[in-house]
Image (tube, helix red, strand yellow):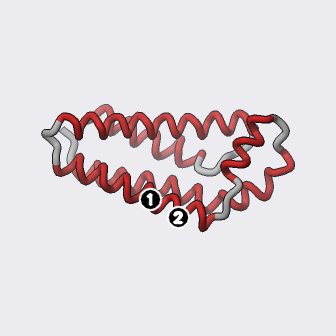
Amino acid sequence: MIESTFLWLFIVVFMVHDFEEIITVEHWAEKRKNLLESKWAKRIWSFWNIRSNEFAKRDVVIFLFVSMLVLLRVEFTSVPVVEMGFQVFLWIVLIHNLFHLIQTCVTRTYTPGLYTAIMLVTPYTLFLLINL
């Protein structure tokens, strides 16, 4: 069984990823607007074309949600629905990271959050899934 410390650390890992997105989103949108030609690339750009403060507001909600899930998982370890719900959430995180890769392939350029999705969040999420 995994220690609760590793579960709490997931919040930090996930927020580092969100910080990368917040820090890079405005600059990325400004530089990439004219480079995007395909219909899908334009849709991706419209998602990322947001001011950092608006992005941060969304991330506060995500932070609270992730914190609540981790708290439930730590406090109610023996409840199967909590365990299953947390594992489903981790799979959703992996799918989210896959979208970072797809967006990068479609736009043929870095997209906000790519580096931490690949180097930090995906490995840590897999670590949790394997050890839960």
| Viewer-closest of 123 and 64 | 64
The amino acid type of the residue labelled 1 equals: Val
In the figure, residue 68 lies in which quadrant? bottom left
Cα separation between marks 2 and 1: 7 Å
Which residue in the protein does label 1 denote?
Answer: 61
At 64% from the left edge and 33% from the top edge, which residue is drawn? Answer: 102
The kind of secondary structure element at disc 1 is helix
| Residue 126 point in image, percent of width and height | 39, 35
Which residue extends farthest left? 78
Disc 2 crowd, CA 10 A, few/some/many (<14, 14-19, 20+): few
Which residue in the protein does label 2 denote?
Answer: 57
At 37% from the left edge and 54% from the top edge, which residue is drawn? Answer: 65
| Residue 93 point in image, percent of width and height | 45, 40
| Residue 51 point in image, percent of width and height | 67, 63
Left or right of residue 66, residue 59 in this image: right
Left or right of residue 109, residue 23 in this image: left
Vertical position of residue 68 compared to residue 36: above or below: below
Looking at the figure, which quarter contains the N terminus?
A: top left
Left or right of residue 114, residue 40 in this image: right
> Number of marks in the image?
2
The kind of secondary structure element at disc 2 is helix
The amino acid type of the residue labelled 2 equals: Lys
| Viewer-closest of 79 and 10 | 79
At 22% from the left edge and 36% from the top edge, which residue is drawn? Answer: 81
